[in-house]
Image (cartoon, rainbow, N blue to C red):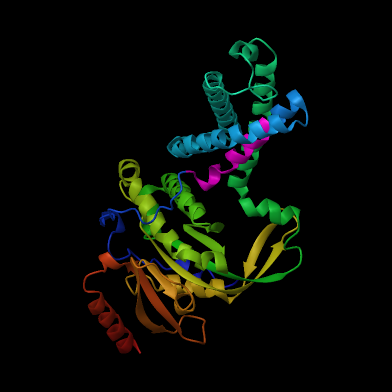
Amino acid sequence: MPGERDHKMIDTGPAPGNFAARPSPGFDILKPWKIVSQDNVYIIYLSVLLFAIYAFSRYGFNWIALTTTLIVSVPVGFAIAFFETQALEFRRRHRRTQFWVYLLYRTMRVTFWFMILFVIIMIIIRYLPIATYETIFPHKMRDFFTTTRVFEFLGIALAISLFSNFIDELHRKVGKDAIYNLVFGKYHQVKQEDRLFLFIDLNNSTDIAEEMGELEYSHFLQDFFYDISEPIARYFGRVYQYVGDEVVVTWPLRKGLRFSVCVRCFFAIQKQVRRYSAQYEKRYGRVPEFKAALHGGNVVVSEVGKYKSEIAYHGDVLNTTARILSKCHELESELLMSDWVHAQIDLPKYLVAEPMGTFQLKGKQQEVDLHSVYFSAAKPEGNEKKRRRFFKRRTQSV
């Protein structure tokens, strides 16, 4: 909507305090207690489907075979999902590989995992006092490899893995909710929703672009957007738009407020960028620094466009969030949160929301209270003096 991106024309300069230089907490409070990435949970369902189809192809509707399938498929799927989660570094290194090349490679890798783990389980079962009659396990190991069973299993695994990985990569390209919403017409009719929006914006983008050149700066943005996608997904956010050097993340209101994931997401992104700071320094000679604004409220949601349709959000909430973002440099804050969000969110003890005052945002008739959010153990030194200097300058300008 008009005016939502006016702040992009102003070079807001660097944010205070280099977050990359701040010490990381000894206890990893930003990482959820999950050893399987949200992007790889589908592998567990894939494993159940694979073994169920294999059991059906051998014995039809047999409860013994299907029960064996559940006992085996869940741990196998969980193990593969864990291994694939640990392989996220590989995906990052090959993020510019052609879509079909990476799809085929990942399909072969997942199929290989299924085959190896199934063989290992068969070996274990072979030496246990367990009857294998009418189960998916052969009586002897050679029965599996000297018959068509191995080809049946490989064929089913390859077909299901290829289809599932294709859907997963497609979701990664266009968004997990986009296909569902467009196919089932969730927003064919205009609707209203309560949502949270987190605007993330690179600092000094104009200067960096001039220094690096268009091509190198494009790679810089590409790496930054790629790296922050994982923590955004981990904290259940959805990328709404990439606008220049800015990322717009959104949550349904309840989901974003629950466990303060909308705020924790920002600090998880900082942690992710710190993780790859050495690679950024080596490749580009700098580490991305960014600021963010968090606001929410009622927005209008609709499907727009005849060709290349997309889900669009409209309303004053987005414009207000953009205006809050433009205040980050003035208030020397990395994350500003509106009073509307602050009144509803229950921040964890390790985060502090410091009141920064009431402001008349550009284009807004009502004043907005803003809060600066930071780690309780990393309060910026002299922050009160900085606020006083800001209010003094503002009073003199008036």
Residue 316, compared with residue 171, is above or below; it is below
- The quarter of the picture where residue 269 lies is bottom left
| Residue 15 horizontal/vertical position (percent) | 32, 65
Residue 222, compared with residue 199, is above or below; it is above
Instruction: Count how many numbered circles sit on residues in the image.
Output: 0
Instruction: Please give left or right for residue 169 compared with residue 16 in the image.
Output: right
Check if residue 175 falls in the magenta segment. Answer: no
Residue, x 34% and y 74% (percent of image)?
A: 330
Residue 194, compared with residue 105, is above or below; it is below
* Furthest residue toward right: 60
| Residue 164 horizontal/vertical position (percent) | 64, 37
Q: Quadrant of the C terminus?
A: bottom left
Write the start and end of the magenta stretch as one range: 36-52
Residue, x 64% and y 54% (percent of image)?
A: 177
Instruction: Please give left or right for residue 9 compared with residue 1 in the image.
Output: left
Pick the residue in front: 125 or 3: 125
